[in-house]
Image (cartoon, rainbow, N blue to C red):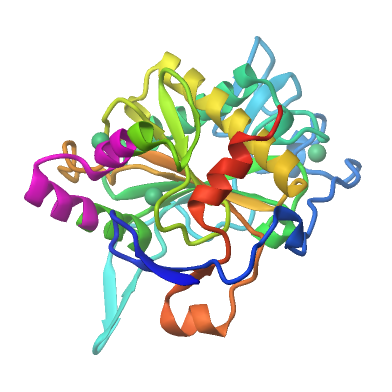
Amino acid sequence: MSELRRDPVTGRWVIVSKERETRPNDFQFERAHILGREHCPFCPGHESFTPPEVWALRQGSDPNGSGWSVRVVPNKFPALKVEGTLGRMGEGMFDRMTGIGAHEVIIETPDHARTLASMSEAEIARVLGAYRERILDLRKDIRLRCILIFKNHGAAAGATLEHTHSQLVALPIVPDCVREEIEGARRHFALKERCVFCDIVRQDLADGARLVAEDAEAVALAPYAPRFAFETWLVPKRHDARFEEASGPELEGLARLVKAVLQRMDRALETPAYNLVLHTAPFGDDVRDVYHWHLEVLPRLTRVGGFEWGTGFAINPVAPEEAAQVLRSVRV
Ligand SMILES: [Zn+2]
Ligand SMILES: [Zn+2]
Ligand SMILES: [Zn+2]
């Protein structure tokens, strides 16, 4: 039987179709391929293939040479650039904006063959630390409003280079996904004087049916109305609207959960393509009590078709309670 479910944060409806018993291996997988490193711009020794680095974790080595463990460079083909002034343009009813912003690539490891799931917890924590450093630096630019960090793993998720990396975009506007979450979180707060994400964490810890993993710092859970099969959210236990305010131990805890979730997905779903998205509060917005930063892991197991584009409804063939149960029962 199908069921319409409403996301408690955004109010977005999702169709959870439990018509047939779907097993993880019923999906047509597109595997992530690891190809040659000869021409890879992210491998050590190829630093001159990228624009000069904006940040790197190095122990004494010179900038733009090898000897780094995490390296951040501007995207060679940026969607947006930090230059010029911010201005609104328009043609009648149509709004436009100058393409101001930043588009950076976070090269997560010098090792071409690693994946985020196969990196150690300490290595993943260093990548999360790089995210934090870049946000702290970019938020000094008053023209920027919002930072989105995401990762495309596998061709089906939009990855064009095999060498594991994440991307950062800094925008002069707040993207719809974040705005919808903030508006929903504001509505919840106005009604209950509590953060909706804290409420979700509390309920799912008590209930357990959608819980995937937990440690002292954060919780991994299948959301009540997931848009994607096996969608998993990683939510810190301590309420904070901004990722860049996270402490060292919080990032270490989050790194443990990132590894646990990705490893479980790799085992249960045979190394699926996925997107990983960091949602954190826009700069300058007073949403300290209302919003709660989090990571979303979105496996790409099914394709989006006309029904989804036309109606805006996601169809998800796996109930989150079942997905959580599958991921929990994986041996890692
Ligand atoms: Zn490489
Ligand atoms: Zn909260
Ligand atoms: Zn989110």
Q: Residue 42's image quarter?
A: top right
x and y percentages locating residue 226 in the rendered image: 46, 57
Residue 50: % across, % down: 70, 43
Q: Judge from the rendering whether residue 106 lies leftward or rightward of residue 42; answer left or right.
A: left
**Closest to the observer, 268 or 125:** 268
**Image side of residue 181 versus residue 31, left or right:** left
**Residue drawn 42% across and 20% down?**
250
Check the image and report above or below for 73 versus 133. below
Residue 207 in view, yes or no: yes
Residue 253: x percent and y percent? 48, 20
Comparing 112 with 279, the one in front is 279
Tell me if residue 331 comes above or below residue 227 in the rendering. Answer: above
Residue 187 spot, x, y in % from top left: 14, 55
Q: Give the range drawn in magenta.
A: 184-203
Horizontal side of 226 relative to 95 (left or right) equals right
Count of labels in the image: 0
The residue located at (25%, 39%) in the rendering is 199
Tell me which residue sits at (78%, 32%) in the image.
Answer: 114
**215 displayed left or right of 25:** left
Residue that lies at the very extreme toward the bottom in this rendered image = 92
- Residue 94: image quadrant is bottom left
